[in-house]
Amino acid sequence: MLVHHTYIDGNSVGHAAQHGFGAKGKKLVAGGQETTAVFGILQSMHKLMKHRMGTLPTVLWDGRSWRFERFPDYKGNRTATAELVAQRERYRSQRKLMFEGLHYLGMRQLIAGNMEADDLAAILTRQVIAKGEVVTLLSGDKDWLQNVQQGCVWKDHKLDRKCTFETFEEFTGYKTRTAFVHSKGLQGDTGDNVVTRIGIGEKGALDLLKAFPCVHTFLDTNLSDAAAQYAATHGKSLPKKFKDFHQSSELRDRFEWALELMDLNHPKIPAPTGIRATREPVNRQAFEQFCMRLGMSGLLRGMDDFIKPFQTIEEIHS
């Protein structure tokens, strides 16, 4: 039987729950502990699993990324103000509770001490595709689009959209996964504080990668031939910013640095360490006690309906 895996970005779903409920003024607290994200992720996971009962789901969580060792300012802009720090801590204080609630619902969960969920998704996708199995990636993070290929679909749980191998170019603007991730290496990622200072933005990256299959092909082609190929594609001369990039060892190094941080399939990514995995049978009694402890009376009233998808998944995959 063909196995269909679903890898779920735990923090993507959790943050969406936190900010979704928070935007509606529905901050939840139990015994002084905020539970907005906890309640929200349980509701979101129930909704997601109702439509994916035939798949084998695994929730992937972030550990402390290996990227901090190579770039200490990685994601440093996310703690740039006291308000951002407070928001981050409000969410982080709920992580163990989210993990606990999903544990009682029988959800497979996985975390590596040195990796983000993005890295785990890439590793697991490579493994299941190699075995001839299929996978759906549930995340609002477009970085996960790097994994889309035959047998792998990316679905945005927040905006209800998806990208398949067949629609990859239409969805991203790039013909291949390599071109897509190379565009990120050129532009950097301000959200992760990865600033390349190469001078090539989104439009420039698109233009360059329409003329060349990847940045390395452009850089490995002598400048006059590269200029001719660009002119043949676009009907205009190769812009100065591309010539500067081609000729500058410093700009090339900046690109390679960014690519190492952003390419989820980069050969220099270390092996996962400190792996923690959990999956126990659905424990209705423990989950009900968990809900009582956190004052989630609505879930308790509708428990039969709420817990059914999780029980069905367990029956199918036991």
Image (tube, helix red, strand yellow):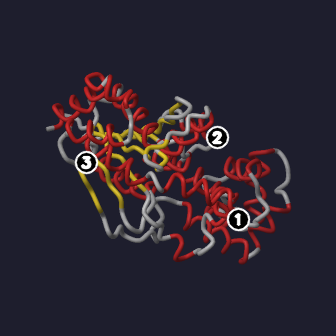
Assign a secondary structure to mark 2: loop
186 vs 58: above or below = below
Percent across and percent down for residue 255 are 66, 67
Which of the 4 image quarters holds residue 75?
Answer: bottom right
In terms of depth relative to the viewer, which is nearer, 210 or 315? 315
Q: Which residue is mark 1?
A: 195
The first of marks 1 and 2 along the sequence is 2
The first of marks 2 and 3 along the sequence is 3
Inter-mark Cα distance, 1 to 2: 22 Å
State the mark number for residue 157: none
In terms of depth relative to the viewer, which is nearer, 299 or 220? 299
Please tell me which residue is depicted at 65% across the width and 56% down the height of the picture: 191
Q: Quadrant of the C terminus?
A: top left
Q: Amino acid at mark 1?
A: Val
Q: Which residue is mark 2?
A: 173
Inter-mark Cα distance, 2 to 3: 29 Å
Q: Amino acid at mark 3?
A: Lys
Assign a secondary structure to mark 3: loop
Percent across and percent down for residue 15 are 53, 45
Q: Which residue is mark 3?
A: 131
Which is in the foreground here, disc 1 or disc 3?
1
40 vs 280: above or below = above
